[in-house]
Image (spheres, grey):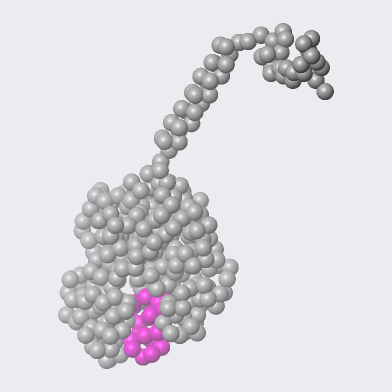
């Protein structure tokens, strides 16, 4: 119990804080210095936080034909939650062809594209600075198929001169394949009239004889062949077929974006690439049945077994590490320059069209 004072009143014992303790010395200037340095630290923290690039957590992504095997890693990363694991929300816009996906990005409606590497080279020749940051496909997987009604008439590309051929979109990689094959045989690249037919309308175009041939990608190419709708004339679904047609490696699909986006959002790009690498690793370590099960059922086109069989035949298409090979980039440039005289070494520095630092 507290002691009584002389007047008999009980008062609480006096509590001493550190500065109130008998013999303690107050230092007002020390307190002010503490506040001053605390404020300086806070200002520096805010300065460095504001000076860092603002990182996006939502990415608008365009792709030209999402159901195609060449772009499977994009959907797989989304389905398996790899983007979410990286703190990203990726909104995918599925367009008719690669040229439309590119146009969407250049128009500012999307941030990145899942598309063919060749677009970064052609864009550079036009003064647009695009960069591929991760490679999915070791070869393009494109197939020029002839409709069953014309198999006896068409044996080489020259036989298609003047005949309508379907491509996914004008200026797309499917369109460029037709022009390259013509130029390679010293024919006019414009001598075959191309008709736009997306992956959903290609079947009707061939069945109704609106076109004589079409450039198609698996799983649709396998289905067309299996159903007797069309047969391959030129096939880049294998390494051998790619070498026969392009004379060397021809890396194709992957993630690309603008130099500005990479500079402004490097960690966002890294996070996206991390998810893509996990998808590539999943492909290498799981069976075609497991991969198919992870995809949306609508991608199976009503026949899961055929989808699995086609996927099994295409597994070698995928890169294991996402790295763009230097010789592959050089060969893509060589084939493009054969068709487009505007693509020259003076206009395009290949080392600026891809960046392997995000995958290494």
Above or below: residue 345 compared with residue 244: above
**Residue placed at 56% from the left, 19% from the top?**
34
Number of marks drawn: 0
Can you tell which quarter of the image residue 210 is in?
bottom left
Q: Quadrant of the N terminus?
A: top right
Observer able to see residue 199: yes
Residue 229 inside the magenta-drawn segment: yes
**Residue placed at 29% from the left, 81% from the top?**
202
**Residue placed at 48% from the left, 64% from the top?**
77
Is residue 43 shown left or right of residue 344? Answer: right
Can you tell which quarter of the image residue 216 is in?
bottom left
Q: Position of residue 49 (x, y in %)?
A: 45, 36
Above or below: residue 109 compared with residue 52: below
**Start-end of magenta stretch:** 216-237
Q: Nearer the viewer, residue 321 or 45?
A: 45
Q: Position of residue 11 (x, y in %)?
A: 74, 18
Above or below: residue 122 compared with residue 191: above
Q: Nearer the viewer, residue 33 or 358?
A: 33
Is residue 36 shown left or right of residue 50? Answer: right
Observer able to see residue 344: no
Q: Position of residue 277 (x, y in %)?
A: 50, 59
**Residue placed at 41% from the left, 35% from the top?**
51
Residue 214 inside the magenta-drawn segment: no
């Amino acid at each position: 119990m507290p002691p009584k004072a002389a007047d008999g009143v009980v008062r609480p014992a006096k509590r001493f804080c550190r500065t109130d303790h008998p013999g303690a010395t107050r230092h007002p200037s020390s307190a002010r210095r503490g506040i001053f340095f605390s404020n300086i630290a806070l200002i520096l923290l805010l300065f460095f936080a504001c000076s860092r690039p603002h990182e996006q957590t939502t990415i608008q992504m365009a792709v030209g034909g999402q159901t195609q095997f060449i772009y499977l890693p994009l959907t797989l990363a989304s389905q398996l939650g790899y983007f979410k694991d990286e703190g990203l929300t990726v909104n995918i816009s599925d367009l008719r062809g690669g040229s439309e996906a590119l146009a969407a990005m250049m128009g500012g409606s999307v941030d990145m594209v899942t598309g063919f590497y060749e677009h970064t080279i052609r864009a550079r020749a036009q003064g647009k600075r695009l960069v591929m940051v991760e490679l999915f496909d070791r070869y393009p997987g494109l197939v020029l198929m002839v409709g069953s009604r014309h198999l006896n008439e068409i044996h080489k590309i020259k036989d298609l001169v003047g005949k309508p051929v379907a491509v996914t979109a004008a200026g797309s990689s499917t369109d460029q394949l037709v022009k390259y094959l013509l130029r390679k045989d010293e024919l006019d690249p414009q001598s075959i009239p191309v008709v736009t037919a997306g992956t959903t309308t290609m079947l009707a175009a061939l069945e109704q004889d609106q076109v004589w041939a079409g450039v198609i990608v698996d799983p649709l190419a396998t289905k067309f062949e299996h159903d007797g709708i069309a047969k391959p004339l030129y096939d880049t679904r294998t390494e051998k077929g790619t070498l026969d047609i392009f004379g060397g490696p021809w890396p194709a699909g992957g993630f690309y974006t603008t130099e500005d986006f990479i500079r402004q959002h490097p960690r966002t790009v890294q996070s996206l690439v991390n998810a893509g690498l996990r998808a590539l690793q999943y492909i290498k370590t799981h069976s075609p049945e497991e991969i198919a099960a992870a995809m949306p059922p609508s991608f199976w086109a009503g026949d899961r077994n055929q989808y699995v069989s086609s996927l099994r035949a295409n597994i070698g298409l995928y890169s294991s590490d996402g790295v763009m090979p230097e010789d592959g980039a050089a060969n893509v440039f060589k084939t493009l320059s054969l068709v487009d005289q505007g693509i020259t070494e003076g206009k395009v520095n290949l080392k600026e069209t891809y960046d392997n630092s995000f995958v290494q």
